[in-house]
Amino acid sequence: MNSSGQPLAGRTAVVTGVSRRRGIGYAVAHRLAEMGANLLVQHYQAHDRDQPWGADDLLEVTHGLRDVLAPAARFGDVAADLAEPHAAQDVIDAAVDAFGHVDILVCNHARSGGDGRLADLDAGMFDAHWRVNARSTLLLTQAFAAQHDGRPGGRVVWLTSGQQVAAMPDEVAYAASKGALVGALKSVADDLAGRGIVLNAVNPGPVNTGYLDDATTDRADRLDDIRRAFPLGRVGEPDDPARLVAWLVSDDGGWVVGQVIDSEGGFRR
């Protein structure tokens, strides 16, 4: 641990999908800021505006993160539609331009909606999820690795989902795109490890980012069943996976390589 008590002091982290204070990305960025990291966060408000839970004021999001930065740490943010082919490179370039080097990448972003059962899908729906959930994550990782100079502490964390532990028949496009990351994880982790970069993935399970609230849920017919499936008496909250991600990107997490870690609070499917 750094002598200041901030284990990420002097390191720079890029966290994607940070546009809502109820989101996992915000919770992760908040944790890393408290640990002393410089931060660059990516957001894309247009996606959130289309969801039942809506979008936040970005100034409130960024001010909330600036408020917990360590005294010597710096902050930046960038708007990017990660469905675009060059957006991943643009995000990493923005971080390198601002901070000189990126030590940590957390790919939290995801496309939600525009999905369904297999019979309901078409090529465009599959492609929309693939571009955001899988392709951009791999391209972000590629761009991160290209700028990494081998210094200690290179970390990448992908956020996946529970498609490897249970069926998701109503979200086939989403499950397929996130499943592609699980399938590629060990191969990419092996490639990166030789360059001093540790890659893992976290499945956060059902986390209430607004979609498990009565007023903003998109699955009202299943809401009570989902809540009852948590044996610890509460649903998942954004800081639950954030704590795990923070540990994985710290020096203490450096001996875990190429793993998908299910952090679901005992969720009973």
Image (cartoon, rainbow, N blue to C red):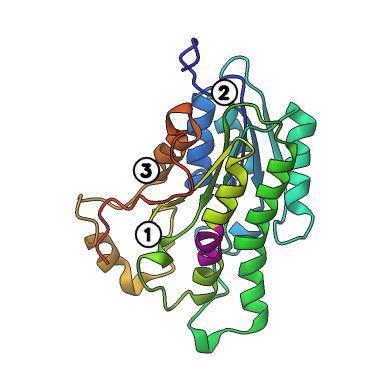
Q: Residue 41 versus residue 6: which sits nearer the camera? A: 6
Secondary-structure class at tag 3: helix
Give above or below for 169 relative to 240.
Answer: below
Look at discs 3 and 2 and give the one toward the viewer.
3
Circle nearer the N terminus (3, 1): 1
Give above or below for 88 relative to 65.
Answer: below
- CA distance separating discs 3 and 1: 15 Å
Q: Residue furthest top?
A: 3
Look at discs 3 and 1 and give the one toward the viewer.
3
Give above or below for 237 relative to 221.
Answer: above
Secondary-structure class at tag 2: loop
What label does residue 240 carry, if any?
A: 3
What predominant SS class does the magenta segment belong to? helix
Q: Which residues are magenta?
A: 178-184
Q: Which residue is mark 2?
A: 69
Residue at 49 percent of width and 21 percent of height: 7
Circle nearer the N terminus (3, 2): 2
Where does residue 130 sit, x and y in percent of width and height?
Answer: 63, 68
Count of numbered labels shown in the rendering = 3
- CA distance separating discs 2 and 1: 30 Å
Give above or below for 92 relative to 201.
Answer: above
- CA distance separating discs 3 and 2: 20 Å
Position of 34 with respect to 196 (left or right) is left
Residue at 47 percent of width and 43 percent of height: 257
- Neighbourhood count class around disc 3 (C-alpha, 10 Å): few under 14, some 14–19, many 20 upward: some
Q: Amino acid at mark 1?
A: Leu
- Neighbourhood count class around disc 1 (C-alpha, 10 Å): few under 14, some 14–19, many 20 upward: many
